[in-house]
Image (spheres, rainbow, N blue to C red):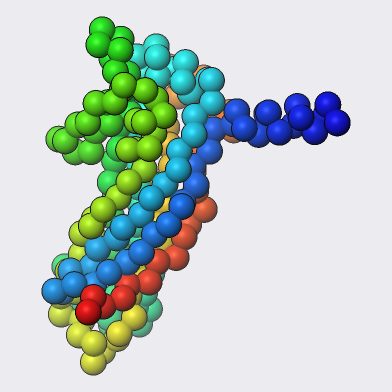
Amino acid sequence: MRLCVCFWLAQAAASTIELENSSGLERDGQLSVDARFIVNLDAVHESALLSGIPLTFAVEFTLTEPRWYWAWRRVTDWFDSSARLDFKLSYHSLTRTYRVGVGTLYQSYDTLNSALRGLGVVREWHIAERGSVTRRFDSRFAGELTMRLDQDSLPKPLQLSLIGDADWRLETEPTRIEFHEAR
């Protein structure tokens, strides 16, 4: 019984990123993604954050359909087949607040839990325009969505000390998203 409780506590304390829900929408020729990620940090990540090390989480989307070469060629003329959105989580010891930044927009939070809830929300992220690929040529657009801790954005000395450390490798499995036309 004690072994089960210890295993459960170790799992509860581990850092994880999970995709709660996601959807792809095509509206007025725009492809956009909505997603909600659940991010949990363990004591090691929280300690680094409290020490002033900002953590950058990358949400990445890769277009996987249409698969026909000529359609891909037309798609890649106006759109790189991948897109990235960076969320930066930081702690400010002077004000004792957590900040989540996306691009030039920042939101402050009083607690780490509330900052983590705001960290994984993606709303109407415009991936691309449908462009010259019409429904007559291919009606299927789909892609893969992932979220991960970007270790390349960590300070170089910390990057070197983390080589081979699986505890700092946080990422979701690629999730397939199909785009549906808005009605």
Relative vertical location of residue 173 with respect to residue 118 in this rendering, above or below: below
Q: Quadrant of the C terminus?
A: bottom left
User: Given the current orientation, which residue lies at the most extreme bottom position?
Assistant: 136
Residue at image x 34%, y 30%? Answer: 115
Q: Is residue 175 left or right of residue 81?
A: right
Q: How many marks?
A: 0
The residue lying toward the viewer, choosing from 72 and 52, is: 52
Residue 64 visible? The answer is: yes
Image vertical order of residue 145 relative to residue 159, above or below: below
- Compared with 53, 130 (above or below) is below
Residue at position x 38%, y 78% from top? 67
Quarter location, residue 72: bottom left
Specify the quadrant of the image occupied by residue 61: bottom left
Residue 154 appears left or right of 105: right
Q: Residue drawn 75% across and 27% down?
A: 6
Relative horizontal placement of residue 5, taking residue 147 as reference (left or right): right
Image quadrant where one finds the N terminus? top right
Residue 106 image point, x, y percent = 19, 31
Viewer-proximal residue, 97 or 151?
97
